[in-house]
Amino acid sequence: MSAAHVAVLRFPGTLDHESAARAVQGVGGEPVYTHHEDVALPDGTAAVVIPGGFSYGDHLRPGALASRTPIMAAVRQHAARGGRVLGICNGFQILCEAGMLPGVLRPNASLSFICRQAELEVADDGTAWTGGRREGEVLSIPFKHHDGAWFGDPGHARVVLRYRGENPNGSMDKIAGISNLAGNVMGLMPHPEEAQDPLLGSVDGRVIIAALIA
Amino acid sequence: MSDGPPLHRTLGLTDEEAGRITGLMGREPTDPELVMFSLMWSEHCSYKHSKPLLAGFPTTGPRVVMGPGENAGAVDVGDGLAIVFKVESHNHPSAVEPFEGAATGVGGIVRDIIAVGAKPIALLDSLRFGTLDSRRSRFLFRRAVEGISHYGNCIGIPNVGGEVQFDERYEDSCLVNAMCVGVVAQDRILSCAARGVGNRLVLIGNRTGRDGIGGASVLASAELGDDDAGKRPSVQVGDPFTERKLMDCCLALSEAGLLVALQDLGAAGLTSAASEMASRGEVGLAIDLDRVPLREQGMAPAEVLVSESQERMLAVVEPAKMDAVAAMARRHELDATDIGEVTGTGDLEALWRGEEVVRIPSRYLTDDVPFQDVPRTPAPVPVPIDLAAVPEPADPGAVWLALMGEPNVASKRWVFEQYDQLVGANTMRRPGGDAGVVRIPGTNRAIAVTLDSAEWHTELDPYAGGMASVLEAARNVACTGAVPIAATDCLNFANPEKGSTGWRLAESIRGMADALTAIDTPIVSGNVSLYNESPRGPIYPTPVIGMVGLLDDASTSLGIAFDLPGHAILLIGHGEPRVDASRYLGRCEGLPPRPDPAGDAALFRLLAECARQRLLVSAHDVSEGGLAVALAECCIAGGVGAHAAIPAGRRADEAMFGEGGGRVIASCRVENVAAITALAEGAVGVQQVGTVGGDDVSVDAGGSVARVGLRDLAEVWEGSILRALEAR
Amino acid sequence: MTMVVVTIMPKKGVLDPQGQAVQGALAHMGFGDVLDVRVGKRIEIEMRGHDPAAQVTKMCEDLLANDLIEDFHVEMPG
Amino acid sequence: MTMVVVTIMPKKGVLDPQGQAVQGALAHMGFGDVLDVRVGKRIEIEMRGHDPAAQVTKMCEDLLANDLIEDFHVEMPG
Ligand SMILES: Nc1ncnc2c1ncn2[C@@H]1O[C@H](COP(=O)(O)OP(=O)(O)O)[C@@H](O)[C@H]1O
Ligand SMILES: [Mg+2]
């Protein structure tokens, strides 16, 4: 059986596509780069990753310009059919700006960029995105962003991950990652693709990436 | 114009230099030509004061693939790959506009790496500001860090290390140095040498505006007969989004074999890029200025020639490949414009509105610079500190805590947390340790990289200070288990014609060269920044060294953190601590101990071998704040206490907080102590001085004991800079 | 209580990467009639005390605007 | 050619951390008469074609403003 194809989106200014692709490969998937001006996802796409970075230089509002590109219409259709979509960092911002996840990501309370290892608590173990991890279990995954404070109505989403301990960025209810109510679209500010390799400090991001093709 | 001083003086050329230009040209230069000479013959572009001295550096070795002279140096790291790197200053622009100055400093050094065809994999920054009780210095510091953060994060290159120091001497002249490291297949390394008569000259990237036009603005407003605000030079504004596209595009062009040569546009813009490319390739270049895409109207030819608009690269392309190049640029949403061609004349020509406004043999600009020897007036030899005159503290624990919170010693977390340290998913050792460790993508090898300078030592004893700068950088690299393989340097000095600055420059270079030779690490690239002084005085001489080390097996790298209670603590190395010029003394005074490069070379070999055999758990060099601070840092990083006992030497406080020598605090499992001692073969000192464990950290120096809770140490050390910034 | 409005725009001749990016996106979205976009800031300040406009002008010089790359304008609506 | 000006401000009731930070800094610098600061955007758009204001309003709805947190206002000066 051939590996499941995962579309890895690339916008001008996307930075984490290579690490995302490597992470997908690491869990047995087949990454396929897909560009912003494409109007359709590659044939046989099983899931979509929107990696981190500074699409369009983060101008206007992070994710705003990318969320209006042609490929996002195709991603929306994929999600409407129940397909899985994972937005990481800038990808999360893009999903919110596209209206595929509720809320918006606002500047960190410190108004500066923060790069730090975080402990994330599984807040809802009912979605596919945390694999077999139970509520309350902790994942060590780094985050790095300037605009990572989620703001919105948590009632319109499932809160999947929360920062443990002190709130690092002023996010509402310490939210680090949410999914839509159906559970197939997930966005998070921390970077699971950078927690795949013991040499880099943690492998806790694997469950999240693996959920793309589970 | 007739009532003002002659144009050449306004442009900063001496009468003698102007005479020399007329002599070389055999006629009076045109105004644009004079502007080009003034910039290319400036210290910034020509190194007219420093080049003769730089010849003293060792620049060859079995690993050197490309030495100084190109955009960046390259060294062989196996698997057919080369690591490419360079450090550069952006001091003056950062003092004027710290955010954009620091940001465009990052942009500039990244383009140097791209010009070699290498993919950037790491950034570092070395910073100097006035003390944090100065409002202006706090502003410069905050904004410069934000500028680096903004630009570096947005282009997607991890920042893995650097340094920050605060001292009154940098109040008026802050230093912002940035280093970029890239990787390239050795058979894909690009040169900046233009070749092939008839080949096209292509400008890729942003449009050209009046950014950063120095002396040339004088000419422009004079020529145009008015000086309304719109014609004034403007500060360069960085555009990292375009830089990222430029980087992707240039690397794709190189990958596809579409480029003959590539060069970034930095200081003096098109003028310096074109003259470098022409004189390196021993060809001529003809530029049609009317084809250069402009952002503003009414720019004079001299302005187009020297504009420092950012995010631009100049390429030489065979005519048959022009379509493919244009297509690639379009794919990356960039302009690529044919602005001229390679000629056989050896001249740099510029055409404007169909008329020839410039024709200069390019070597006049690059090679016929009037070099100047700097005056070498030695400063008096300082007197060693009389220990008896330094009061012995009643409570060494309190001194220790205070030292941990001194901004120069304290954690620089506030700085490096604003940098993306991880993008690319190859960062194995993040900032906060001794050196950043980055896996070479697609291999099992890793490099360790650091930036360091010993400016106090260089002020007091420049030969020793030059050595100390090299050895401190190398020690930081060696502590990760890597073997130092090559270096780059950025010489930040005051006015070389004044006081003892010229002598300090020459002496420190001699010291660096001797240390580099002793530890077998050639210099492969570098940069000089002079005139860092104000009416209130010169900066400290600050030779910043960027050191690169290699780990053949990435999985053997070491960090600074203590791990498990019960592990043995070792003091490895040589030399006696001294209070002279230490942070404990708190003043740049005394006679710092002379470094021992041979001793360090042996230390580095031992550390690398221990790492290879996985005998050590951690290693951390003893630097600012001495042994007590180094020990505390290992404990904080590991979240575990420790106890160490050391001889008192001349006095307990000196043993705890004195600096100097080549000393490393390491930890290992107890059963490995014997093997490590055996490996040292008596050539390197290895002493077991304590044990990891507990909730506090203590040092016993010959019976005098300092003991502080780990939590207290961590809190003071980690929060100090933020507190200093928020206090007012 | 008075409301003072500060407008801060990139200086003429200074690169405005944000404006360029927004202009490009608008063109892609089919807004073909856009010729130029510049993005700046608007700051609304509620003031008491006297001569609020003069005070705010001072704030612009001291903090709010960077005169090397930005032009500012102070006005009191209404 | 027409210039259309868009003003985008944080919605009332939505926290404006940038405005608060500016207010704090101003207070530190001795501007004691400042009661409130809100920071938003000003976008200047050069347009051709007809009904530029309507076109720009559409741009605001489609892209320029995020109605969850921002209010926008379109005007044609002069
Ligand atoms: N400006 C900076 N940028 C990135 N990292 C920094 C910076 N300043 C300090 N660091 C990090 O903090 C570490 C410790 O700083 P410091 O104690 O000054 O270094 P050193 O080991 O050279 O004495 C550095 O090795 C580096 O990893
Ligand atoms: Mg160190």
Image (tube, coloured by chain):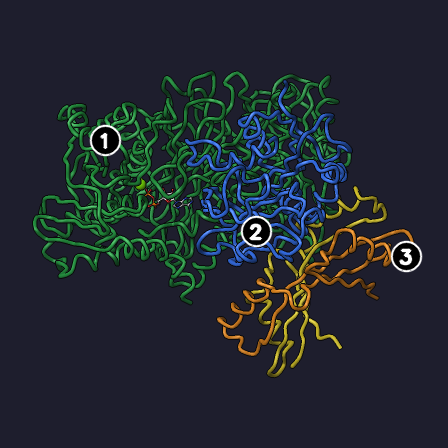
Chain colours: A blue, B green, C yellow, D orange
Q: Residue furthest bottom?
A: C50
Q: Mark 3 points at which residue?
A: D51
Q: Where is residue B625 in the image (x, y as percent from the top left)?
A: 25, 49
Q: How crowded is the residue under tag 2: few (<14 C-alpha within 10 Å), some, or many (20+)? A: many
Circle 1 sits in a helix, a strand or a loop, which is it?
Answer: helix
Q: Nearer the viewer, mark 2 or mark 3?
A: 2
What is the three-letter code of the residue carrying label 2? Gly
Q: Name the residue under label 1.
A: B600
Q: Mark 2 points at which residue?
A: A148
Which residue is at a point 58% across and 28% down the rendered structure image? Answer: B362
Q: What's the distance in space between the residues labelled 2 and 1, CA to CA?
A: 45 Å
Q: Are marks 2 and 3 on the same chain?
A: no
Instruction: Say whether residue B523 is left or right of residue B97.
Output: left
Residue B605 location in percent, x, y?
25, 25
When asked about the image quadrant of residue D21, the answer is: bottom right
For this view, does A53 lie left or right of residue B566?
right
Determine the chain carrying the residue at label 2.
Answer: A
Residues at marks 2 and 3, CA–CA distance in whole angstroms = 38 Å
Residue closest to the eye, B111 or B432? B432
- Dot 3, how many residues are within 10 Å of its Cα: few (below 14), some (14-19), or many (20+)? few
